[in-house]
Image: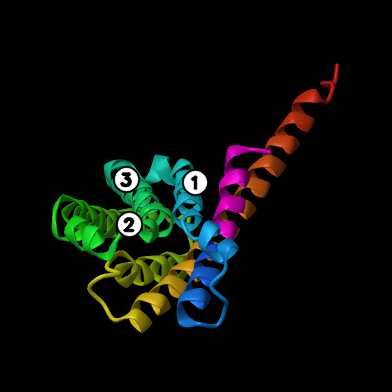
Amino acid sequence: MSVHRVAAVAGFACAVLLFVNSARRAGYLPETALTHAIAPFGALTGLLAITGIYLLIRRTSGTLGLVGYVLNSAGLAGAFAIEYTLHFVFPYLGGGVVSGLLTGGTGRAFLVTSVVLLVGVVTFSAAAIRSGAMPVVGVLLYAVGMVPGSLRNVVPLPVYLAGLVMAGVGVAWMAARLWSATELAESQASKRSGRSAMPSAS
């Protein structure tokens, strides 16, 4: 399986995880060990997805695409670390310890991560639209949804969850385009290979 196909599958998985996380936080799915265990991987699969998208658009997105990819990737990696901490570290600490961490360096690190992710999403989305290789509506859904999705401690919970759902739809849409673009490229490569293998007339 090619890198693009792996990234597309990761994009679909990211969308599912964002939907599941939103449903769990909204009370539509139960709080179980499984739903908590898979929660951080939405950001990780999202990182794999945008890597594949960047590989597809890098020739036409220019410097803006590279900057957006680096910032978006750093933000998603940080978001994965935050989610992991929230689900697997903070629950085992006392409330006073958690409050102290959030009011100190840990809280500032969380804030910086949110800002980097927000700037990266906006920049990367602008580059993806400019490249012409991604569906504009899908990219806009990702960008608009990730604005509240990046600011979980600032916006109301319903807005945050709605943003995650919107971002999930956008990621799935872009993943579908990535998959179809890979199929087209493979089909064209196969045709070129077939033509080159045909014997020339004497």
Left or right of 126 on screen, residue 33:
right
Question: Which numbered dot is residue 186?
Answer: none
Spatial CA span between label 2 and label 1? 31 Å
Residue furthest toward the top?
A: 202
Task: Answer whether labels 2 and 3 touch (C-beta < 8 Å).
Answer: no
Q: Position of residue 128 (x, y in %)?
A: 39, 55
Left or right of 39 on screen, residue 185:
right
Q: Position of residue 155 (x, y in %)?
A: 26, 77
Q: Residue 17: name its quadrant.
A: bottom right
Question: In the rendered image of this protein, does residue 183 appear above or below residue 86?
Answer: above
Q: Which residue is mark 3?
A: 74
The amino acid marked with disc number 2 is Leu
The kind of secondary structure element at disc 1 is helix
Quadrant in the picture for the N terminus: top right
Residue depicted at x 36% and y 49%: 81
Q: Position of residue 85 (x, y in %)?
A: 36, 53
Task: Answer whether labels 2 and 1 touch (C-beta < 8 Å).
Answer: no
Question: Label 1: how many residues lie within 10 Å, few (<14), some (14-19) or many (20+)?
Answer: many
Q: Looking at the image, can residue 131 be seen?
A: no
Q: Which residue is mark 2?
A: 93
Spatial CA span between label 2 and label 3? 27 Å
Task: Answer whether labels 1 and 3 touch (C-beta < 8 Å).
Answer: no
Residue depicted at x 41% and y 40%: 59
Q: Looking at the image, can residue 187 be seen?
A: yes
Residue furthest toward the left?
A: 104
Is residue 98 or residue 154 the one in the foreground? 98
Residue depicted at x 56% and y 47%: 7
Write the start and end of the magenta stretch as one range: 1-13
Q: Main secondary structure of the magenta part?
A: helix
Question: Which numbered dot is residue 48?
Answer: 1
